[in-house]
């Protein structure tokens, strides 16, 4: 992480070709949000890097927030709200 922080402080010509965090996602909503709120006001909760600015130059990775098999959240069967 330290190396990536230093790279982001002075990327120069971006020799590694890293992408801004919001561009790593396929869903167009990230690009639309960046345009709407301004990239300087947009944070991304990244499964790999934590909470980072949308403009943060980030290597491509494939990590998602998913429960491990057998640890999925289950809705309660009867919470007494609909009785």
Image (cartoon, grey):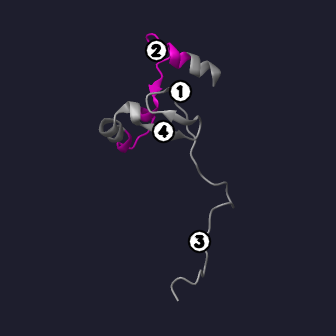
Q: Nearer the viewer, residue 19 or 6?
A: 6
Sequence order check: which comes first, mark 1 or mark 4?
A: 4
Q: Indicate the secondary structure of the residue bearing disc 4.
A: strand
- The residue lying at 58 percent from left, 21 percent from top is 4
Sequence order check: which comes first, mark 3 or mark 1?
A: 1
Q: Nearer the viewer, mark 2 or mark 4?
A: 4
Boundaries of the magenta span: 7-30
Count the numbered circles shown: 4
Q: Nearer the viewer, residue 56 or 40?
A: 40
- Residue 14 circle label: 2
Q: Nearer the viewer, mark 3 or mark 4?
A: 4
Q: Indicate the secondary structure of the residue bearing disc 1.
A: loop
In the picture of the structure, the residue carrying the numbered disc 4 is 44
In the picture of the structure, the residue carrying the numbered disc 1 is 59
In the rendered image, residue 23 lying in the magenta stretch gets the answer yes
- The residue lying at 58 percent from left, 34 percent from top is 49
- The residue lying at 60 percent from left, 79 percent from top is 77
Give the left or right position of residue 58, taking residue 76 as reference.
Answer: left
Q: Residues within 10 Å of mark 1 (few under 14, many from 20)?
A: some
- The residue lying at 51 percent from left, 85 percent from top is 82
In the picture of the structure, the residue carrying the numbered disc 3 is 75
Q: Residue furthest front?
A: 41
Q: Nearer the viewer, mark 1 or mark 4?
A: 4
Sequence order check: which comes first, mark 1 or mark 2?
A: 2
**Image position, residue 39 (x, y; %):** 37, 32
């Amino acid at each position: 992480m330290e190396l990536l922080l230093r790279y982001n402080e002075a990327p120069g010509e971006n020799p590694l070709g890293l992408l801004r965090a919001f561009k790593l996602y396929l869903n167009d909503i990230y690009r639309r949000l960046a345009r709407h709120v301004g990239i300087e006001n947009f944070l991304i909760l990244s499964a790999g890097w934590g909470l980072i600015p949308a403009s943060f130059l980030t290597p491509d990775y494939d990590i998602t927030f998913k429960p491990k098999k057998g640890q999925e959240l289950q809705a309660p069967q009867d919470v007494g709200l609909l009785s």
